[in-house]
Amino acid sequence: MDYLATIDGDLDLKATERVCEDEQRGGFKLDSVKFGTVFDEGKVKLINNAAFDMANSTAILTNLEFRELGADNVDSVKTQMKAQGWTFICDSQVYDANQLKRVLVFGKN
């Protein structure tokens, strides 16, 4: 990991996805994203930590998709997304408007 971005856990999933896409514009490729907490001004704050690796611009998957898993089968979702041209990045738990959700993260150009 070359760069770690801290993202507010109160953002919804689409907003978190957009933040990660924006962070990649600096020459970084999303490697993983996961939930966490920080102590801020006397209170515990929910956050998502997005880890990035430095990458050549051609290696960066500029369009990200954070797919909430719900009751879906992981392998079925991966197969479906791959058929649509998406590359699997990670399987993780993140905060979506302060609610912990399991997501599969995909990217494509």
Image (cartoon, rainbow, N blue to C red):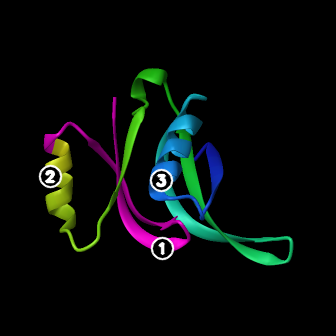
Residue type indicated by callout 1 = Leu
Find residue 79 and name its label: 2
Give the mark nearest the N terminus, 2 or 1.
2
Q: In this rendering, would 66 be left or right of 76?
A: right
Q: Position of residue 108 (x, y in %)?
A: 32, 35
Give the mark nearest the N terminus, 3 or 1.
3
Per the image, the residue denoted by label 3 is 32
Find residue 9 and name its label: none
Q: Nearer the viewer, mark 2 or mark 1?
A: 1
Write the start and end of the magenta stretch as one range.
Answer: 83-109
Which residue is depicted at the point 59% across and 58% down? Answer: 49
Per the image, the residue denoted by label 1 is 100
Q: Position of residue 59 (x, y in %)?
A: 41, 28
Q: CA distance from mark 3 to mark 2?
A: 20 Å
Q: Position of residue 68 (x, y in %)?
A: 33, 62
Q: In the current view of this chain or complex, which residue is farthest to the right? A: 41
Which residue is depicted at the point 86% across and 71% down? Answer: 41
Q: CA distance from mark 2 to mark 1?
A: 24 Å
Q: Position of residue 23 (x, y in %)?
A: 58, 38
Residue type indicated by callout 3 = Ser
Q: Quadrant where the C terminus lies? A: top left
Residue type indicated by callout 2 = Thr
